[in-house]
Image: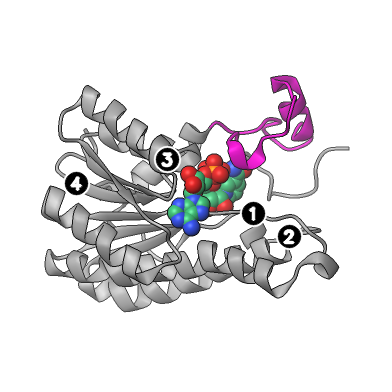
Amino acid sequence: MRLEDKTALVTGAARGIGAASARRFVAEGARVAIADRRIEEGEALANELNSERAGSAIFTELDVSNEEAWKNAVGQTMSAFGKLDVLVNNAGIIRVTPLEKTDLALFQKVLNTNLVGAFLGIRAAMGPMEARGGGSIINFSSVQGLEGREGMSAYAASKFGIRGLSKTAAIELGPKGIRVNVVIPGPTRTKMTERKGWTDEQYNEAYGGYPLGRIAEAREIANVVVFLASDEASFCTGADYIVDGGVLVGKPRA
Ligand code: NAD
């Protein structure tokens, strides 16, 4: 029970890495607010977790790019659990388009979700965290937060940006007892990376040249989120936690 008595709000938790994190949090003793704009899937996960441990989860509808919606989501979490210890800014979207097809609306949509969403989350959560003497904020970057990639101008800009936001937040919030860290997942098997009709072998083949030679399961990323949320990470702040199966260590094997 590494998260016993902790309460957390996880964005984008209706599915993928966010859902895997919410499951691990509850398994480790936490109570979790599943915050997502996908109502049906989010409520289903909250029901599943509550059937495992009564009172362990709520669903709260949240579009992370909407400041008012953040007030509501944090308010509902505080009403249900009485405090907020952990915020996971996991919600994200990707668009793969060359620059000439990346219009302003597309660029802003990706930035508003992936970067502005985390900024609004930090602003909404820092007051309640400070009031109880501290907390842990975990922001999601990507391998594309450390290197560019064709067709990913908006996504890479948002994922580089979140690292700058996180380091600055760590400086400002450290004295308030709030730790701020970044998780950098490599390729992970979720809806975001789904390719219609692909088999397990095809997924692993696509990443076969990298050191671990396969795609990750969402729970392998969630394991690191649990660590950063827990008191085991009490001296960790402002850092990037790479969980990429070695994708970033160098060029793939031939
Ligand atoms: P996913 O598409 O499976 O899930 C994303 C979740 O975010 C969904 O439930 C979606 O409804 C929610 N979401 C999207 N926009 C939202 C908004 N405006 N408000 C609230 N919720 C919103 O994606 P995933 O693979 O689980 O990705 C989770 C995070 O990990 C993202 O930040 C992503 O960029 C990052 N990441 C993923 C991978 C990967 O290979 N899957 C790799 C690196 C980084």
Q: Magenta span has 214?
A: yes
Specify the quadrant that holds the C terminus: top right
Q: Amino acid at mark 3?
A: Ala
Give the image location of residue 125, x and y in percent. 27, 65
In this orientation, which residue lies closer to the viewer: 108 or 224? 108
| Magenta-colored span | 188-217
Give the image location of residue 205, x and y in percent. 78, 28
Work out how far the residue at label 2 is from the one at label 4, CA to CA, in angstroms: 36 Å
Residue placed under numbered mark 3 in the picture:
14
Mark 4 surroundings: few (<14), some (14-19) or many (≥20) residues within 10 A: many
* Label 1 beta carbon within 8 A of ligand 1: yes
Which numbered disc flags the more N-terminal residue, 3 or 4?
4
Work out how far the residue at label 3 is from the one at label 2, CA to CA, in angstroms: 24 Å
Residue placed under numbered mark 1 in the picture:
94
Residue placed under numbered mark 4 in the picture:
6
The image quarter containing residue 54 is top left
Mark 2 surroundings: few (<14), some (14-19) or many (≥20) residues within 10 A: some
